Image: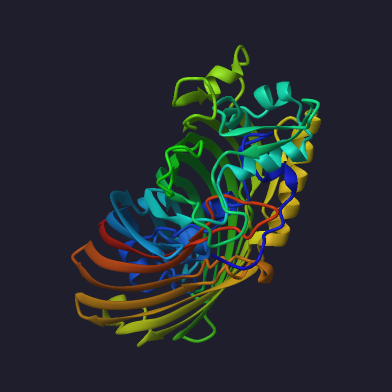
Amino acid sequence: MASFRYLLPAAILVAGSAAAQLPEDVLRYGFPLAGGTARSQAIGGAIGALGGDITSSYVNPAGLGLYKNKEFVLSPNFGFLRNRFDYRGSNTNARDNGIGYGPIGFVLGSQSSYRRNHSSAFAISINQIANYNNTVQYSGFNNTSSWSEQYVEELVRNRATVPQAENNFIFGSSLAFWTFLVDTIANAQGQVIGYQSVVPLPSGPGGPEGVNQINRINTSGGAHEVSLGYGTNNNDKFHFGFSFNIPFYSFRRDQTYREEDASGNPNNDFAYFEYRERYRTSGVGFNGKLGLIARPTNRLRLGLALHTPTFANLNDQISSSIEANTEGFTIFPQPQIKTSDELKGNNSNAGNFRYNIITPWRMLGSVAFVINEVKDIKRQKGFVSADIEYVNYRSTRYRADDPTLVDDVAYYNQLNETIKSRYRGAFNFRVGGELKFKTLMTRLGFAHLGSPFSRDFRDLRGNRTLLSGGLGYRNRGMFIDLTYVHAIIRQNEVPYWLQDKANPIADGRNSRGNVVLTLGFKLM
């Protein structure tokens, strides 16, 4: 557990008070392991200055300008994930597998009939830019804090009356209140002066009381982007391109969090509680990408690309429940169960949140050195390529879909301030190369994605390292590429956030393997 405390605006500590979005969602939309063809992934994604690949539409559209023919591309992949978390001294493993895809589409390139060494290409494709299939699980003993304390903080912070505690926080604190996981504190006159959790924790660390905590989160879905790209070639020296892209999102999360009494005492008014949450997000957006590639010499290529933010409109749906067994704390039968559907009553819109998000912008610089650069690509011997990318994660912004809703506007303003303090701009590095032996090619690549967290949150690791290698075959208008990408991911999970205590952290050392196959056909 980290020794520091995370200071967050009070309004966003518990999802469901005003909206369902949290600062962690920045990484879902701004920090994906983007897909590409097997060729582009084999060289670490360093495709920015190379071009001649349909992935260019998503990286540097100027690369489409290197096409002088037509082709169709299909890129299925298979991924397998292994998560290992260390939570309060206990190690837990989880695995997940899934099928995905890279760019699928057409590139329609043609040479100019009027100007020598001039050509242009149009591309239409769809690409899975993020895969959300994942299983996170960790558990451990905690005698310092409890998930339930965030509900106490929320009720105290809002100076909630008993009726407000029952009805105003239907996705968290009200559920805890109805199940007696959280109860009132009264003075000698019977007046409510505060709230307390019934979870047994010692007054100081090291006491006999405490709880076993188990958290399991299953996520699925993905982000998919349709791209319309165009690139031009001017005298085989300069290439310019742009793409208009429409991403659409589908995200599903099912979480079960449980705390169990670890003391073995059947008379301490607590046996266990279990929180369940069902969360769904869907939406669509748009963005643009611009790029240049210059070829000052036959062997050297220089690339520059700018990715605008994605402007997206999203819709969230959330429902939750708490089941708690407080033994003899109340006269009511145990366990008690309460759901958000019960508490929302006739308000059918409760649990539905519509909002806008602006994702980070990106700047990409690239360089490539082509071995034996000649117009006849069959005589080329290979290349070395490198990209450096800057991503400004702290520029992510949320906006209320309806600006007349004052509470929503205030909530998103506070959320944006938290994002600016928690995240920063980061650099991503990619490098790779290819050696060509007539119709066969071998490739290697490396990529390092820098941590998006600011210095004040440096204990929340977020860097990723990708190692890749692959083979390619090209002959008679057909090509087949096969690649394996191994991602090493440092990922921290914080199950709950408290204002007056250090927050527990699950330290993840995770790995993701991805086998990518690309089939391509040159069209007449």
Along the line of sight, the residue nearer the viewer: 212 or 284: 212
- Residue 403, image x and y in percent? 78, 32
State the residue at coordinates (32%, 78%).
444
- Residue 93, image x and y in percent? 32, 59
Establish if 81 lies above or below 331. below
Hey, which residue is sitting farthest top in the picture? Answer: 346
Establish if 32 lies above or below 272. below
Along the line of sight, the residue nearer the viewer: 470 or 109: 470
Identify the image quadrant of the N terminus. Answer: bottom right
Residue 200 is left or right of residue 66, and the answer is right
Establish if 95 lies above or below 481. above
Quadrant hosting residue 355: top right
- Residue 240, image x and y in percent? 56, 65
- Residue 505, image x and y in percent? 52, 60
Along the line of sight, the residue nearer the viewer: 516 or 288: 516
Identify the image quadrant of the C terminus. Answer: bottom left
Establish if 146 lies above or below 337. below
One can see residue 346 in this view: yes
Residue 4 is left or right of residue 404, and the answer is left
Q: How is the image coloured?
A: rainbow
One can see residue 232 in this view: no
Report the number of numbered marks: 0
